[in-house]
Each structure stands twice: as C-alpha cells, then as structure tokens.
Image (cartoon, grey):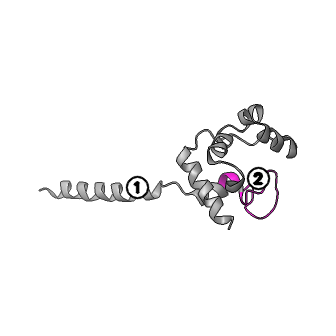
Amino acid sequence: MSRGFVTFVVVGLFIVITLPKVYAFNAETTFNGVCAACHSIGQGKRVGPDLKGVTKRRQQDWLIKFIKDPMGMVASDPVAKKLFDEYNKIPMPPQPTLKDGDIKAILDYIKKKSK
C-alpha cells in the first residue's frame, strides 16, 4: 500500500471517530445558550417561568409542542394561554429546528437539575 493511501485511511478514521463528538448535541449547553436568558431552573422567575419541576407539571408531548410552536399552543391550549397572559404576553421564541430527541434531552437536563 502506498504511504498516501495509509495516511488517507488514518485521517478518515480519525474524522469518523471524532466528528460525532464534536457535533454531539449537548442539552446543558443548549439550555444555557437558548433557554437560560428567559428561564431558570430553581432560581425564580425571569422573563419566563422558572422551569424547576416543569416535567412533573406538564406532559412531555405538551412541552415539546410548546417549545416548537409556543404561539400555536397559546392559540389552542388554555394552559398555554394562561402562561402567556401571566408573563405579560411576551411570546417565547419558537424552536422549530430542535428535534424531538434534542428537546427530550433538554427536558431530562431540566428534570435532573430540578432535584
């Protein structure tokens, strides 16, 4: 085998092994970068509600729908409407690009931090 081919294979394997770690979804980082500006976990209300214990108060499917399309939920769900009114009608930015699995990971992070 040529030296160039071996180098190509080694570099290729390195990329295949390390790339998923570099781009792996991190719930804590995402929460801190996307959610923490308006929400805390056990630190009290901010622009939005304190999320401590939210996974006990709401079903996971409800939370996923709300995170992806908060104003759609406000229009159709009385609990979402009440929250919207309670927090001065400040809309939560929708997060349609987050995958359900990513949102579940964030909810697991919130649940863990709520203890």
**Helix, strand or loop status at disc 2:** loop
| As drawn, 73 above or below 20 | above
The structure residue drawn at horizontal position 24% and vertical position 54%, both measured from the top left corner, is: 8
| As drawn, 81 above or below 15 | above
Residue at mark 1 to residue at mark 2: CA–CA distance: 31 Å
Q: Considering depth in this image, is 68 or 18 the residue closer to the camera?
A: 68
- Which mark, residue 38? 2
Q: Is residue 48 left or right of residue 108?
A: right
Q: Earlier in the sequence, mark 1 or mark 2?
A: 1
The structure residue drawn at horizontal position 83% and vertical position 41%, both measured from the top left corner, is: 82
Q: Which residue is mark 1?
A: 19
Which stretch did the figure color magenta? 33-53
Q: Quadrant of residue 4?
A: bottom left
Q: Position of residue 112 (x, y in %)?
A: 62, 64
- Residue 36 shown in magenta: yes
- Type of amino acid at the residue the image marks with label 2: Cys
